[in-house]
Image (spheres, helix red, strand yellow):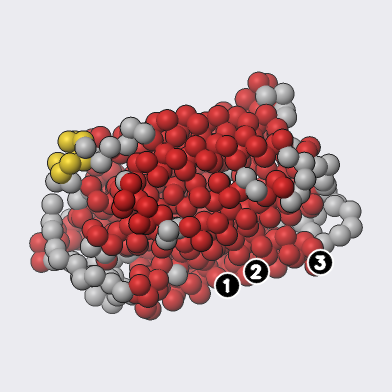
Amino acid sequence: MLNRIKPKLSFWQIFNMNVGFLGIQYSFGLQQSAINPIFLFLGAKEEILPILNIAGPVTGLVIQPLIGAISDKTWSPRWGRRKPFFLIGALMGSLCLFAFPLSPALWFAVGLLWILDVGNNMAMEPYRAFVGDKLPDEQLSMGYQMQSLFVGAGILLANASLFLFQDWFGGGQDIEGTIPKWLYYSFFIGSFLSIATISWSVLKTPEIPPTDAELEEINKHRSLPFAERFKMPFVEISHAVKEMPRFMWRLSAVYLFQWYALFVYWQFITPLFRVTMGYDTSEAAAQAAKMSTTYNVVTAVVALILVPLTLRFGGKKIYALSLFGTAIALIAIPHISDPVYVLFPMVLFGIGWAAMMGIPYSMVSKIVPQERRGVYMGILNMMIVIPMGIQTLTFGPIFKNLLGGNSVNAMLFAGAFFVIAGLLATRLNMPKDTNNPEIDL
């Protein structure tokens, strides 16, 4: 492992480094709360919502580890190592967000989602590695929980814009095949934030130059024939998976149930409110946005509070408890028909979301080699998108044939999966020696 002494950064330096996550997560917030309503407006049936969302898992599975491996072998004195990738990704995301509400048909919106997910994944993975590159081990928890804060803030802004614009500019009957005008404004704001916030972080945060040994390795890679360079990321990913620490294999089991359940929640929260509250699609989408706003307010508030708690009690305990709390929230939601009271479980969901977005990344970043951090962060995100891909392929038949086509049962199903994830998280023991990740505490 290549070690170096990294300077400690101030609070505002860590803050500026992570501002770009606001734009990425605003886009992600729209995907959570607005994309599926748009599919419904354009005539999609509920049982095909999972397969329409397969773009996220497929692009994440392909793009994130590839970009991670490629960025590990990249260096430009002017542009850096990770920055070029999240700049290109942000530009792609910005253009797609501007075009999304103008979709004339379902096929067009689905196609745009594929391109949007490529851009978001291209920006997301190097950003995770960027924080690990810059911060010493003792500041990694702060760095990733700061990202968690911006996760909450970005999704909060996206969802607040949705229900506010629906309240101000909505009304009238939903017309199948037509996207209501109130949805346009949220996407246009996201288009601006996607590129503006990434540009802020790029301009404010210089990357640490590679060591002489790293630069020699990068130049050696550049001197290879094109065919060799092309296959190198795939070889690197293969080797990294074979040598992956036991901790990450255990985390993959937690992620299987956690991210499967989250995808169920995001896809079926709007249909749920059409059942439990008798709302039309616009009203149900606005209520779903209020739910997301609530839990992301909580996430933004508690994200940094989790840092001292994690240091005192350990990441494993805080993470496992947060998953159990999320399970309680999902099981409670279908039993509440009041639009205000149904927001209360989202406090537990928000605490869980803050932990999910920070703790696993800081734990993994401490145990993987610096020179392979990009590829391992890509593999960690593969552990997110593989469960999502499984969900998109399997949950449609499960929903239709086993759950009776009932979104209430879908939400209870997601809650049960979070219970399993919490139980598996109790097995996440950190290595005694980060240079030998197979020895558990």
Q: In this orientation, which residue lies closer to the viewer: 236 or 319?
A: 319
Callout 3, which amino acid?
Phe
Q: In this rendering, is residue 207 above or below 318?
A: below
Q: At x 68% / y 55%, what residue is drawn?
A: 290
Residue occupied by mark 3 = 169
Residue occupied by mark 2 = 188
Q: Secondary structure at mark 3?
A: helix
| CB atoms of marks 2 and 3 within 8 Å | no
**Of labels 2 and 3, the one closer to you:** 3
Distance Cα–Cα, label 2 vs label 3: 15 Å
Q: Secondary structure at mark 1?
A: helix
Please identify the quadrant where the C terminus is shown: top left
Q: At x 73% / y 64%, what residue is drawn?
A: 164
Q: Position of residue 45 (x, y in %)?
A: 74, 37
Residue occupied by mark 1 = 192
Q: Position of residue 18 (x, y in %)?
A: 41, 67
Earlier in the chain: of badge 2 and badge 3, it is 3
Q: Secondary structure at mark 2?
A: helix
Q: Position of residue 377 (x, y in %)?
A: 33, 50
Q: At x 35% / y 72%, what residue is drawn?
A: 11
Callout 2, which amino acid?
Phe
| CB atoms of marks 1 and 2 within 8 Å | yes
